[in-house]
Amino acid sequence: MGGDVFGRELRLISFGESHGKVVGAIIEGVPAGLRLSEEDVQRVLDLRRPGQSHLSSQRAEEDRVEVLSGLFNGYTTGAPLCMIVRNLDVDSSYYGEFRRFPRPGHADYIASVKYGGYNDHRGGGRFSGRVTVSMCMGGAVAMRLLERLNVEVIAYSLEIGGERAKDFTLEEARAYRYLNPVRAPNEESYLRMAGAIEEARREGDSVGGIVEAIALNVPQGLGEPIFDTIEGDLAKAMFSIPGVRGVEFGSGFRAASMRGSEHNDPMRIINGKIRYVKNDHGGAIGGITTGEPLVIRVAFKPTPSIAKPQDSVDLEMLRDVEIKVKGRHDPCIVPRAVVVVESMLAFTLADHAMRCGLIPSVMR
Amino acid sequence: MGGDVFGRELRLISFGESHGKVVGAIIEGVPAGLRLSEEDVQRVLDLRRPGQSHLSSQRAEEDRVEVLSGLFNGYTTGAPLCMIVRNLDVDSSYYGEFRRFPRPGHADYIASVKYGGYNDHRGGGRFSGRVTVSMCMGGAVAMRLLERLNVEVIAYSLEIGGERAKDFTLEEARAYRYLNPVRAPNEESYLRMAGAIEEARREGDSVGGIVEAIALNVPQGLGEPIFDTIEGDLAKAMFSIPGVRGVEFGSGFRAASMRGSEHNDPMRIINGKIRYVKNDHGGAIGGITTGEPLVIRVAFKPTPSIAKPQDSVDLEMLRDVEIKVKGRHDPCIVPRAVVVVESMLAFTLADHAMRCGLIPSVMR
Amino acid sequence: MGGDVFGRELRLISFGESHGKVVGAIIEGVPAGLRLSEEDVQRVLDLRRPGQSHLSSQRAEEDRVEVLSGLFNGYTTGAPLCMIVRNLDVDSSYYGEFRRFPRPGHADYIASVKYGGYNDHRGGGRFSGRVTVSMCMGGAVAMRLLERLNVEVIAYSLEIGGERAKDFTLEEARAYRYLNPVRAPNEESYLRMAGAIEEARREGDSVGGIVEAIALNVPQGLGEPIFDTIEGDLAKAMFSIPGVRGVEFGSGFRAASMRGSEHNDPMRIINGKIRYVKNDHGGAIGGITTGEPLVIRVAFKPTPSIAKPQDSVDLEMLRDVEIKVKGRHDPCIVPRAVVVVESMLAFTLADHAMRCGLIPSVMR
Amino acid sequence: MGGDVFGRELRLISFGESHGKVVGAIIEGVPAGLRLSEEDVQRVLDLRRPGQSHLSSQRAEEDRVEVLSGLFNGYTTGAPLCMIVRNLDVDSSYYGEFRRFPRPGHADYIASVKYGGYNDHRGGGRFSGRVTVSMCMGGAVAMRLLERLNVEVIAYSLEIGGERAKDFTLEEARAYRYLNPVRAPNEESYLRMAGAIEEARREGDSVGGIVEAIALNVPQGLGEPIFDTIEGDLAKAMFSIPGVRGVEFGSGFRAASMRGSEHNDPMRIINGKIRYVKNDHGGAIGGITTGEPLVIRVAFKPTPSIAKPQDSVDLEMLRDVEIKVKGRHDPCIVPRAVVVVESMLAFTLADHAMRCGLIPSVMR
């Protein structure tokens, strides 16, 4: 049991439920002297907030962060940062029945088995995407830490509903992703992705997609050869995000059908520096960052909550039923997941940077 | 630094280098009273041993396990199990030069950066596939623990060099995979995969592939909703295996282009039990096992060591060079990785089963 | 850095500062289905609350606990419990100067060195005894868990200001300790201890003391032979309480001058059970609980805050100064520490009981 | 279960049993580039080796260390160091009967309960003092790391059999402690302590004692205010050593009867530095090192193995018996524990120094 703590030197502890009083996080191990404001965190939270377009859930949470500890005179103190966001617009009226008629694709049934029925099932409780608020809190702090190392993290929707982004540059993605509600890297792909979401929504259905994230200026040498590989810790971070079904680095699954002569990235001296001529390795070899851009792709399943009728069971009477899921849901979770992927990528890199002694215990 | 410890209640500690004295493992947290022999471990090690066919490295290690502690009168004692395998057929003659001329696709260069040149580079040292011996040791113990829960773990080569297995049943895979050197699930795919490896070998090249692993009879409720999800811990375990570039569960990356109505697995009462009608979720929802077969796929890159000339750099003179990698290498690591995937799958499940209190601290 | 997480299966995370917004705790790994109310926690918090007699600090905190997560319909859910207490009666007027003129016996100076001056120094910040609120929160939950195992934890002031309790029975201590403000085990010792405190207070001075704690009905076999010994984990727990300078078990330091023939506890069959005839071992041998009462003694230094003038330094001008410490302080912290010792004893035992599988992951 | 791992950034993993094949240790997280030889470790092991005088056990182990991994060309590689010592002079003839007739003061009985009788009981197995070999291995590596920080660790027998050392200086202790078999700090106390041990031995009895350890030049700021206090982690380390019953820092238990005005260490500017005029705090305030000498005292019980007849039970027939313990035992374990205390003190300080970023991940 347990399992709500992530990281080793920098630790993220998640708490709270979808329809409880709060969702929140403790970020532990943060060096003293980091300039940080509630606004730094709010900015990240706002990027995952629901109700911002007709493409996402109409739950209208303000998601105003309140820092309860660890901050003093605008700087971190070295003590644990505790932050909360209150759950205000809670409407649990639809959820009571999911105890009895579990929603396919959701954890309703298995959570009830695991926790003997004692779990807070309202709004999915601890299994809700709302819990990613904790991750954004950790990410906001991590991003501030990474600024010191000049590391930048950029995620965007690479594919939604089968529509794959193309013909974009990283510069475009950096500039455009948060200017459009689906977090596409350029306008052309935004239009196609938005179309796919809208079509699914109209049909009472949902779509999945792929988030791609790039970290730039990553220091060489983060990660360990066995077990605590950078890929392994990042993958663990990503699978914590609800709905993730696959994670890959660099050429990823495509590498499986490549030849060695094709996949190996040749090395050359470029401007006096040792560089890889291409980046099929995705910024990590042998579990360790090479200094090339770290490239990760995260596959999300389609939102399980759909308006269409579905086959389920009546847990009380042990008989088959057909259910329709009401409530306010995103026809695609990928757009709101983009900043969560960015957050967990930043957090994991910051943790490993601290493990390697690259971030001092007091920042000045 | 560090990072050589995996697991929480059941812990696997890896040590040793490719061309050092030994490779070994400590398995800590093992309940007392588990019947275990060196043969139980040897059987697993033998499945990853090199030199067994012309399709794999000709390094002729006997890989004879020696248990140094934790075993008494044929049973575990509750104390740490320490096991070693000695490195006998060590030929480091080819490796000295990799310090200066790093092999593309290998960690030679980045390891030298990370460890300031102090790492044992011989045979790849700590980055060698040989270190997966530790994982097989842990897997052997975990498999014995899982027998108590009736859990069975079956892995096989799903795809090698672009040749994908097809038309096989799980029963065929279970029976056939260790009867053929590429660990294919049936004869037809074996022939195609072996052909692909042989062709690459002849051309001085290498191929990658995908391992699929299934766990049967997995208890419901393993894993946690946040951070310590079963998928996250399994993914971390898999990315520890050298050469892994992607991990997915159930429909995996394919889920990204599915509709919710298509991906959600309907629930039905079947023989009085609550079951999922299909298994696109791959045995885990919300980070927790559902009791359906756990399905994981692991993508391996092609072996980086190839005979073809490659572009590299001279780290001493800081100039471009062309190198040819000598030494004894597998043209495809996938066949030998199959039992390693099985091992890490078993280990992670056993750890989570212990966390959930399903394995008693004394077995009787 | 960090270090705010205690325990392995049951984890206590502390956050908050003396004069910040809140002090609080997360208790993680709690099984689902434990009946728990805010009153259960309040009862424990009330026993450490200041301002309850003229013998303790006049800070008048109501210390009303608010559970933010993990509780649903009166039962734990298996998700992290987050609890806070707001700091209301905060008077930081005295503390600004401690930045410049550190108080002897306090962490003012060394904290400023460690955190580069960024620590929240107000009221001692993270070093204040007020942070033991977190420990009482963890203790309250642990005590509820231990009820299932019939374990009872009883602490009391064994010695204060040189006045040692005598001629009391455990039954007296259990009944009387929370009926008197110094937490003495019987009335006679209460009067002597209260006299010692009062005398020190009148003289602008302070006194230390010893808390003794007994755990009854402790299951056999808690603890491990190496490193995670029950004594080691308990000692670590106790040294987290501000002001602790020594910890001993059973005959403790006195054992150092005993003969083996005197210290060894003879074993006998008593009522068909294997028992120890006496308990100089204090309930643990070889790091493992024997089932006899666990006996621990914890030495507290005298409160460092005293009214008498003291030699200190001016950190700004680097010169010697004499200071007088104002503020509201306990002339003896031992009485209020009693329930904190009880809490950390309970928490550590509950964690080890969970490690040994004695508390199920769902309680029914 | 488990519990054989100590430390956070620098981790010590212990394995092996008294009469098994080996005792050994893994030291994980060691920076690359530390100059280290087997002789460095042997020197420490030799200081705890039995059979060196008639005052200690006559078991004649050579205790020759063999480093199995992590060392290359005389330097650490950053990979786990695995070391073993083989058990050669094993005589288990006396031990079979302890399964049935447990020795008072030993873990024979409770270990059998905890491990369901599967533990390796020979020679005390995992509960034997022989397991402290692992600790000396960790200590040897830690001492080499601490040399970089100029930290020195000095332990000695402060009291044995009621004979307390007096009139010695730290310089005398440093020079003399390993020149005499009881590890006394000066000759006068050596003679008295040796007399006490000899007298107990003649009477078939045993004595306990107190080890005092001092660490010099400890960097300021090691340790954390809550939970991971330097005192707490050191206490946990010490209670791992078999036979320890109490741990105290600075004035320790004596502080309980002091006044605040007496215990508080005044601060003064001395030679331009902020210093404490005396050291009743023992080098740590608020869980954090102050830079003053760290002073710890560790109380050991008398050796439980004595020649005198003792009351025990027959576990098979469940009846009272009288037993006499044969075998080769130290009439006092304190002399051989001195270097173990030194080792665990060094290890814990090195771990905390790494946590604070004071030891780089590559040493040059």
Image (cartoon, coloured by chain):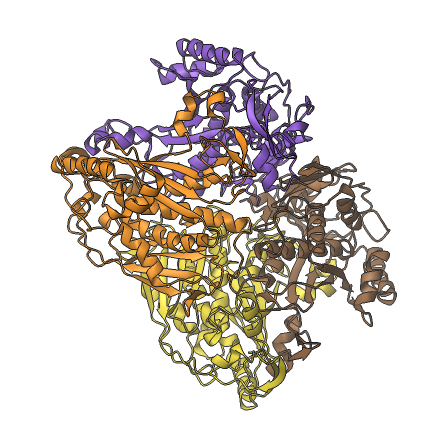
Chain colours: A purple, B orange, C brown, D yellow
Pick the front one: D215 or C178: C178
- Residue D333 position (above or below residue C70): below
Q: Is C275 situated left or right of C325 in this image? A: left
Viewer-proximal residue, C313 or A19?
Answer: A19
Tell me, yes or no, if residue D345 can be seen here. Answer: yes
The one of B148 and D117 positioned closer to us in this rendering: B148
Residue A216: image location, x then y, percent: 38, 27
Name the residue located 59 percent from the left edge and 88 percent from the top edge.
D309
Question: In the picture shown, does residue A351 fall above or below D261?
Answer: above
Instruction: Tell me the residue at 57%/90% (across/down).
Output: D203
Relative side of C172 to B314, left or right: right
Residue situated in front as seen by the camera: D301 or A115: A115
Farthest bottom residue in view: D202
Image: D140 above or below C37:
below
Q: Residue D54's spot in the image, x, y percent?
A: 45, 86
The residue at the point 85 percent across, 63 percent down is C190
User: Image quadrant of residue C173?
Assistant: bottom right
Residue B129 in the figure: left or right of residue D118: left
Residue with the most extreme left position: B202
Residue A80 is at least partly visible in this image = no
Counting the numbered discs, the total is 0
Q: Position of residue B133 (x, y in %)?
A: 31, 52
**Residue A149 point in image, percent of width and height:** 42, 31
